[in-house]
Image: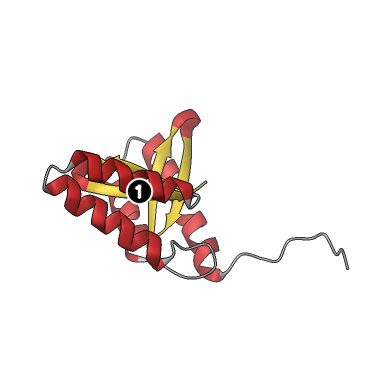
Amino acid sequence: GNPSALPPPPPAAAEVLALVQQRKDAKDAKNWALADAIRDEISSKGYTIKDVAGGKTEIISNKSSDDGGIPSDIQKLVEERKNAKAAKEWVKADDIRDVITAKGYAIKDVAGGETEVLKI
């Protein structure tokens, strides 16, 4: 065999990739209702999709696990920062963000009061 060949993606990932393609086709056809329904289905499988520049789609797993998921200590910091922001404690929120960044994660506030956490 070819030792440098990548292992096949887990079934969920392949299924989600197929759904992302279906959603792209629906959007290209301007079938927004179908595109939204597919997005919701992807979400129900534990993934968030985000349209990024160049017509690409970023797939983010919502599953927290040791294989690339967000560690619980980072999630705890994100929650603390959210609470600090809710209390308008901006300096504390910024300090917590700096700690998260120092641990190798970037956080980005997105619409709806949600926070996106990405490994740097």
**Chosen colour scheme:** secondary structure
Q: Residue lying furthest left in this view? A: 87
Q: Secondary structure at mark 1?
A: strand
Residue 36 x %, y %: 28, 48
- According to the image, label 1 marks what residue? 116
Q: Position of residue 34 (x, y in %)?
A: 30, 48
Q: Quadrant of the N terminus?
A: bottom right
The image shows residue 32 at horizontal and vertical percentages of: 28, 41
In the rendered view, would you say 32 is above or below 4? above
Foreground of the two, 20 or 32: 20
The local crowd at label 1, few if under 14, some if 14 to 19, many if 20 or more residues have their Cα within 10 Å, is few
Quarter-of-image position of residue 44:
bottom left
Point 34% across, 45% down: residue: 97
Residue depicted at x 61% and y 64%? 9
Q: Residue furthest top?
A: 54
**Toward the viewer: 65 or 43?**
65
